[in-house]
Image: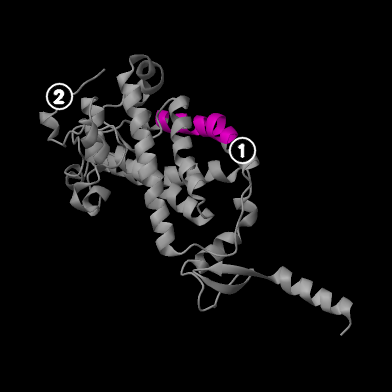
Amino acid sequence: MNSSSTQTAQATAAAAMEISIHNGSTLLFCDEPYDLPNAPALQPLWNFVRRQESLLKSPFFPVLFNFAIYTAFCFPFIALDFLSPWISVLRKYKIQPHSSPTPQMVVLCLAQSIYHHIVCIFPVTVAHWYWRPVSLPSIAPEVPALLLQVAVCLLLFDFLSFLWHLLHHKVPWLYKNFHKVHHKHVSTFALTTQFASVWELLWLGFFAVIGPMLLGCHPLTEMTFFTANIWLSVEDHSGYDLPWSTHKLVPFGLYGGAPHHDLHHQKFKFNYAPYFKHWDWLFGTLSHAQKPSDVKVNKD
């Protein structure tokens, strides 16, 4: 074999495979590694995701992903809202059983969400897409690394959101001009999650993005975090305390969940953290859920 043929063969092999250092050992990966003994458990899933490369690298993907996941999580709760007046067993899981959204309220919240995704979120995600092009590595993340980074991102989002939320309640001008719109609904339902000012949505979006950027998260980890974050936010505003609600799954009462945040919308001056309870406990702003009849609603 002459030198030209050898170089061609080497170039072909290099194009088809990449050497990756993974968990301290050198692994040889093809473009889509299926059966390698040391491949991560999430590799088949990641291979499937990578086949959608044209969609993932589209400037439309972030806003479509956000809106699709958001509405997919909202609509089951909206269905419960419309069914609960007719099915009594559902009402026992409602935090405020005598309050349900009207069709007009649902349409208004959905229309505002569509408008904000088009006018506000889409331009920002396009700018982010241009500034930070999507990279799709061949190898999937390990499950422990993914779970750890998702947890860290949630804790960081929770902390930043707590500070922002506390500030916008303590400073009357900030509350009146930027946060008050989110408190229009004392009895929340799923679609009130993103019923907020553009200012608030942009800051919450920044808090969601900054964690994966600082940690250098794998794209699959980012998508997992964004999905979990949207779910927890929707659950917080759902108005339901279901048997499988997140706050019942997290041990030691560390997580507040829907009862915790619903009480914030009723009492106004407590429970500023969106998810966990420790920041409200440290700042003396923690209030425990009570029966709706015992709550004095602040309509400010």
Residues at marks 1 and 2 touching, judged by CB atoms closer than 8 Å: no
Q: Which residue is mark 1?
A: 126
Residue 76 disc label = none
Residue 53 visible in rendering = yes
Image: 71 above or below 249:
above
Farthest top residue in view:
173
Q: Position of residue 170 (x, y in %)?
A: 30, 20
Side of 10 where 298 appears, left or right: left
Q: Name the residue at 17% across, 47% down.
A: 89
Q: Nearer the viewer, residue 241 or 130?
A: 130
Could you say which is closer to the camera, residue 216 or residue 248? 216
Determine which quarter of the picture holds residue 236.
top left
Instruction: List the residue tagged with mark 2.
Output: 296
Image quadrant holding the N terminus, namely: bottom right
Residue 263 in percent (x, y) is at 21, 32
Left or right: where 48 falls relative to 92: right
Are there few (<14), some (14-19), or many (20+) residues within 10 Å of tag 2?
few
- Residue 2 in percent (x, y) is at 89, 82
> What span is colored magenta in the figure?
108-124
Amino acid at pointer 2: Lys
Q: Residue at x 43, y 58 (%)?
A: 146
Name the N-terminal-most of marks 1 and 2: 1
Q: Amino acid at mark 1?
A: Val
Mark toward the viewer: 1 or 2: 1
Does 146 sit above or below residue 258?
below
| CA distance separating discs 1 and 2 | 44 Å
Residue 122 covered by magenta stretch: yes
Image-based side of 26 in relation to 2, left or right: left
Q: Position of residue 54 (x, y in %)?
A: 65, 53
Residue extending furthest front? 24
The overriding secondary structure of the stretch rendered in magenta is helix
